[in-house]
Image (cartoon, rainbow, N blue to C red):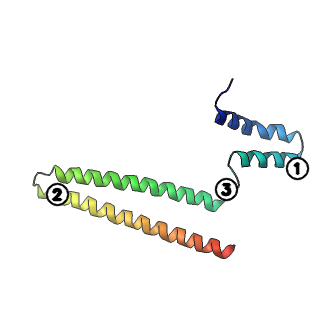
Amino acid sequence: MIKNTKIKAYLLLSLTPYTTLAVGTKDAEKNLTKAARQANVWERTLGSIAGDVIKSVLIYTGVVMLLLMSYAGVLWMTAGGNEEQINKAKKIIKGSVIGFLVVILSYTIVFGIASFANNILK
């Protein structure tokens, strides 16, 4: 017997279209709507999907920036007075900070415009 409730919910949702189509179109729509609400999967718009994609990209950008900063820090600390290696580390730090600031600024602009447009359309 299946003990995990999430697995049960996914199985129920995967079987719902087949069981509700036999009832009729209006009943099927009601049942699918009810199942979607129970699963917290309700009316995703293109804007919400794009927002989720942008947020994911920003998270990965932050991780890459953190990795670059860590690499540059290790490079600088292990330079042992080698000016060429220190300059390389400084360039990496400068580039990653500028890149991160550009990403944060673009995030602010995109979501500011989206928020403004959303308020106008309501």
Residue highlighted by disc 2: 86
Q: Position of residue 107 (x, y in %)?
A: 48, 66
Q: Residue at x 69, y 45 (%)?
A: 39
User: What is the x, y in percent for residue 55?
Assistant: 51, 57
If the image is split into quadrants, where does the N terminus sit? top right
Q: On the picture, is 77 further left or further right than 3? A: left
Mark pair 2, 1: CA separation = 69 Å
Please say if the residues under marks 3 and 2 sit with CB atoms less than 8 Å apart: no
Q: Which residue appears at 71% of the width and 34% of the height?
A: 11
Closer to the chain start, of discs 3 and 2, is: 3
Image depth: mark 2 or mark 1 in front: 1
Indicate the secondary structure of the residue bearing disc 1: helix
The residue under label 3 is which amino acid type? Arg
Mark 1 vs mark 3, CA separation in Å: 21 Å
**If the image is split into quadrants, where does the C terminus sit?**
bottom right
Q: CA distance from mark 3 to mark 2?
A: 49 Å
Residue hosting label 3: 44
Instruction: Identify which amino acid the numbered label 2 is placed on.
Output: Ile
The first of marks 2 and 1 along the sequence is: 1
From what the image shows, is residue 89 above or below residue 25?
below
Mark 1 lies on residue: 26
Residue 106's tag is none
Residue 116 vs residue 98: left or right? right
Marks counted in the figure total 3
Q: Residue at left 67%, top 56%?
A: 44
The kind of residue on which mark 1 rests is Lys
